[in-house]
Amino acid sequence: MKVGLFVSILGLVIAFLGAAIAGTAVLAKAIAQPQGVAVYNPETIVRALDLFLIVANIILIGAHILGSINSLGLFDWITRE
Protein backbone atom coordinates (compact mmCIF):
# COMPACT_ATOMS: atom_id res chain seq x y z
CA MET A 1 0.00 0.00 0.00
CA LYS A 2 2.87 2.34 0.76
CA VAL A 3 4.32 1.76 -2.70
CA GLY A 4 1.10 2.99 -4.31
CA LEU A 5 1.12 6.14 -2.20
CA PHE A 6 4.75 6.84 -3.06
CA VAL A 7 4.08 6.35 -6.78
CA SER A 8 1.04 8.63 -6.51
CA ILE A 9 3.09 11.34 -4.83
CA LEU A 10 5.82 11.00 -7.45
CA GLY A 11 3.27 11.33 -10.26
CA LEU A 12 1.74 14.39 -8.66
CA VAL A 13 5.15 16.01 -8.27
CA ILE A 14 5.94 15.38 -11.93
CA ALA A 15 2.54 16.80 -12.95
CA PHE A 16 3.15 19.82 -10.73
CA LEU A 17 6.50 20.48 -12.39
CA GLY A 18 4.94 20.09 -15.85
CA ALA A 19 2.20 22.58 -15.04
CA ALA A 20 4.74 25.02 -13.66
CA ILE A 21 6.83 24.74 -16.83
CA ALA A 22 3.74 25.26 -19.00
CA GLY A 23 2.78 28.31 -16.97
CA THR A 24 6.26 29.72 -17.30
CA ALA A 25 6.18 29.19 -21.07
CA VAL A 26 2.85 31.02 -21.43
CA LEU A 27 4.06 33.83 -19.21
CA ALA A 28 7.26 34.15 -21.26
CA LYS A 29 5.18 34.28 -24.44
CA ALA A 30 3.03 37.04 -22.96
CA ILE A 31 6.04 39.06 -21.88
CA ALA A 32 7.86 38.60 -25.21
CA GLN A 33 4.98 40.00 -27.29
CA PRO A 34 5.60 43.54 -28.43
CA GLN A 35 2.86 46.09 -27.88
CA GLY A 36 0.25 46.13 -30.65
CA VAL A 37 0.96 42.69 -32.17
CA ALA A 38 -2.51 41.49 -31.18
CA VAL A 39 -4.06 44.10 -33.45
CA TYR A 40 -2.50 42.51 -36.55
CA ASN A 41 -2.33 38.88 -35.43
CA PRO A 42 -5.05 38.03 -32.87
CA GLU A 43 -4.08 34.32 -32.71
CA THR A 44 -0.85 35.10 -30.86
CA ILE A 45 -2.45 36.98 -27.99
CA VAL A 46 -2.26 35.42 -24.54
CA ARG A 47 -5.40 36.10 -22.58
CA ALA A 48 -5.55 36.50 -18.84
CA LEU A 49 -7.88 33.50 -18.70
CA ASP A 50 -5.05 31.28 -19.99
CA LEU A 51 -2.85 32.35 -17.10
CA PHE A 52 -5.63 31.95 -14.53
CA LEU A 53 -6.30 28.39 -15.72
CA ILE A 54 -2.65 27.47 -15.42
CA VAL A 55 -2.42 28.98 -11.93
CA ALA A 56 -5.58 27.10 -10.88
CA ASN A 57 -4.08 23.88 -12.24
CA ILE A 58 -0.89 24.38 -10.24
CA ILE A 59 -2.84 25.10 -7.05
CA LEU A 60 -5.02 22.00 -7.49
CA ILE A 61 -2.03 19.76 -8.08
CA GLY A 62 -0.30 21.25 -5.02
CA ALA A 63 -3.39 20.54 -2.93
CA HIS A 64 -3.37 16.92 -4.13
CA ILE A 65 0.29 16.59 -3.23
CA LEU A 66 -0.36 17.87 0.28
CA GLY A 67 -3.34 15.53 0.62
CA SER A 68 -1.28 12.53 -0.46
CA ILE A 69 1.49 13.41 1.97
CA ASN A 70 -1.11 13.81 4.72
CA SER A 71 -2.62 10.40 3.90
CA LEU A 72 0.81 8.82 3.95
CA GLY A 73 1.55 10.36 7.36
CA LEU A 74 -1.77 9.17 8.76
CA PHE A 75 -1.18 5.68 7.36
CA ASP A 76 2.24 5.58 9.00
CA TRP A 77 0.80 6.84 12.30
CA ILE A 78 -2.02 4.26 12.34
CA THR A 79 0.18 1.28 11.44
CA ARG A 80 2.94 2.12 13.93
CA GLU A 81 3.50 -0.65 16.49
Image (spheres, rainbow, N blue to C red):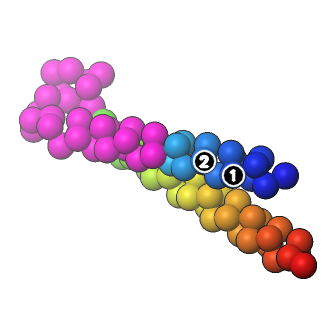
Q: Residue furthest front?
A: 81
Q: Amino acid at mark 2?
A: Leu
**Where does the C terminus fall, quadrant-wise?**
bottom right
User: Which amino acid type is shown beneath numbered disc 1?
Assistant: Phe
Identify the residue at image location x=23%, y=41%: 28
Query: Is 37 included in the stretch rendered in magenta?
Result: yes
Q: Which residue is mark 2?
A: 10
Is disc 2 surrounded by few (<14), some (14 to 19) or many (20+) residues within 10 Å? Answer: few
Mark identifier at residue 44? none
Q: Quadrant of residue 33?
A: top left
Q: CA distance from mark 2 to mark 1?
A: 6 Å
- In magenta, the rendered stretch is 17-45
32 left or right, relative to 1? left
Depth check: give the residue in front, 42 or 79. Answer: 79
Side (left or right) of 78 relative to 66: right
The quadrant in which residue 64 appears is bottom right
Please tell me the numbered disc located at residue 6.
1
Q: Mark 2 touching mark 1, by CB under 8 A?
A: yes
Seen at 80% across and 70% down, the residue is 76
